[in-house]
Amino acid sequence: MEVNSLTAMAILVLASYIFFYLPASRLRGVLVLIMLGIIGYALVATVAEMPTFGASANPPHNEVYQRYLHQAVEDTGAINAIAAIITDYRAFDTLGEVTVLFTAIAAALSNLKAH
Amino acid sequence: MNLNYEHLPVIIVALLLLAAFLEPIVYRHKKSWAAPLVIASMAFFALSSLYLMAAVNYHGPFNYYLGGWAPPFGIELEIDYLAVFLLLTFSVIGLIAIVYGLQDLKHGLKDEVLGWYFTLYLLLMASMAGISVTNDLFNMYVFVEISAISACAIISIKESRECIEASLKYLILSTLGSGCILLATAMLYMITGHLNIGYLNDVLPRVMSHYPNNILISLGFFVVGYGVKAALFPLHVWLPDAHTAAPSPSSAVLSGLVIKVYAAAFLKVFLKAYPREIFLEIPVMEIVLFLSVLAILYGSIVAMVQEDIKKMLAYSSIAQIGYVFLGFSLMGQRAVAGGLLHIFNHAMMKSMLFLAAGIIIYSTGIRRIRDMKGLGVKLPLTMGAFTIGALSMVGIPGTNGFISKWQLALGALDLGRPIIVVVILLSSLLNCLYYMPIVINAFFGVKGEPELEIGKVPGVMLYSILFLGFGIIFFGIYPAPLLAFLQKTVTAIL
Amino acid sequence: MEDLLVRIICRLVVPFVQLYGLYVITHGHLSPGGGFAGGAIVGASMILFALAFNLEAGSRKLSHDISLLMESGGAIGFILAGFVAMLLGQNFLTNKAAGFPLGVPGNLFSSGAIFFFSVAIGFKVGSTMCTLFYNLIEGSDRHRSSE
């Protein structure tokens, strides 16, 4: 896909105009559909270009993957490689996930108590 | 035992999280210790950020491997000049806002939710610290998610209908942004096999020709994701309601810091992860520049017609975040430095203005700009501080707002774009049009018919805005050390 | 809801569900599952109990104070385990290099800190699920009674 900055800006202005200022009408619906069609086309074009699922030549099959699969037991002592990754190699992310849970419950409880 | 300063960044994040987890228990069993715990953790955050800044300035940037796993296997923190600059900004403003908030929140919140407010505040601060120091895209996403949820919650915690509506709107749009960021991160991982920002920068030029569409769409998703969260112009619709309805300390933090942290994350992703040659082929930065120009003009014009003072300040934030993105998207040395400086300066000015507006609402209950006639006589120090903030927003020399606008204008001229200077000048004039009437009315306006009832202003609230006002003048007159530091920051990034 | 069949079957099933949840949590490093999945199973068992009986019966089994403590305790344990590694002279959240005993791979007590992290996450997730459920039900009860 070729992107030219002027056309992109024109599309942006048009989209903003359609979404924010055009009153609800049949024309607006058609224009929104066209916009969605353009976005959908771009996304489908991206999917078509993605590396084949599970192929051995894919970029993620690099040294990281090799190490996680072959050295996890030696490095962490866990025979479940997923546990080794989420609670050892990337334990900080898991701490973040636990915090997300805590944040969600803090948000929910504070709202329930406040109202 | 070998505890040197390299552990400090992760200790900051972990201790803030620890304090956040302890806060509900403490508040339930020993209510009087809850506030000191928050203040102590924020003070630790501020002091250690100061120490880190000195250490990094002296010894140079360093990396920290979590769990001892060097990248690409584990998560890496990169504590460079940018990270310590952001840490210092967030910690100092965050400390002042919560010191102020201790008084204001007792007034505005139910007693039983105060403990949860402290928890959410600390979680927000921890996530912002995490976003500043991390060098891993997925780790950044995790922290973005924490800050998105906690930012929504500190809006809706106030007992009113508008708060619920505003924060629901914010929650929906912000979750949409998070989804975009996650998708883009997944796309980058799919085509490179790395999540570390440094490795991405190495690998992306090699795979650019194989997956042009993936890179294009990931750029689009990042712009939309961080744009929604930072309220870049066409994606700003949640901001005015959210920042207006929230309790004043929340507004100060949300407007001063939270939208900035996403702008900083945008800077990290676009200038550190993506290689520079991508922007020659895909003009995404031109588009962001165009949007930020629109944001500056739109925010300033719409702010003029607002009646509610907090809403006016919120629209002004849309314009000011435009300046930050303007600096980043120009991608020149001085422009990016100007954008970063504006993060710091605007954090000070806007949180000060929101806190001053909070004092006005706290002591008089006035929210409408029209009713503020003669307020300068009744609340001289508050309105004095407000005047300093207003002057700084307009960009009068002698205040720090002038310095960052000057840097941005010089940066634009360096790259041969005089039209940007015109935009900055025009927006300064517009700022003048909506900030100055408030000041003039407050000091020289004829008093309204009913005599105003002025409640007592607590000293802590007053001192915190005076401290910020002092900071505005100080960095307006003596910006040299900050500019020198930013010079180093930008040289390291670009 | 006053259904004898549901209550008896629930009484029979809940202990097994909880045991299974604990199994999944503690065998996180050996088999699929781990703290998140196991915690969800334990939390679901408490929700099942509250659904079949009523809220008071559920609250008697797990009071607000205890669930709050578990809530924070799981996450605090995670962070403190990270700090232990730091006190042992390594980076935050280090496992093997900090000297946690790895044991024999495949045994229940192996893999050092991972076992501990799984248990902490399990506690956290389980208490999150039932706290959230109980509070939502309570909130709607209070709302209904106030109207």
Image (cartoon, rainbow, N blue to C red):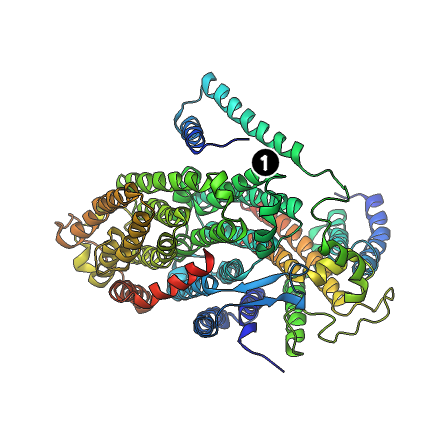
Q: Residues within 10 Å of mark 1 (few under 14, many from 20)?
A: many
The kind of residue on which mark 1 rests is Asn
| Residue at the extreme bottom | B1
The quarter in which the C terminus of chain B is drawn is bottom left
The quarter in which the N terminus of chain B is drawn is bottom right
Say which of C64 and C45 sits in front: C45
Left or right: where B252 falls relative to A83: left
Chain bearing tag 1 is B
Q: Is residue B139 visible?
A: no
Left or right: where A14 falls relative to B392: right
Residue that numbered label 1 is attached to: B213
Left or right: where A55 falls relative to B34: right
Q: Position of residue B447 (x, y in %)?
A: 14, 50
Residue at 82% from the left image edge and 44% from the top image edge? C6
Q: How many marks?
A: 1
Q: Is residue B289 visible?
A: yes
Say which of B229 and B422 sits in front: B422
Q: Say what secondary structure mark 1 lies in.
A: helix
- Residue A42 image-quadrant placement: top right
Q: Position of residue B333 (x, y in %)?
A: 38, 55
Q: Position of residue B331 (x, y in %)?
A: 41, 49
Left or right: where C10 falls relative to A14: right
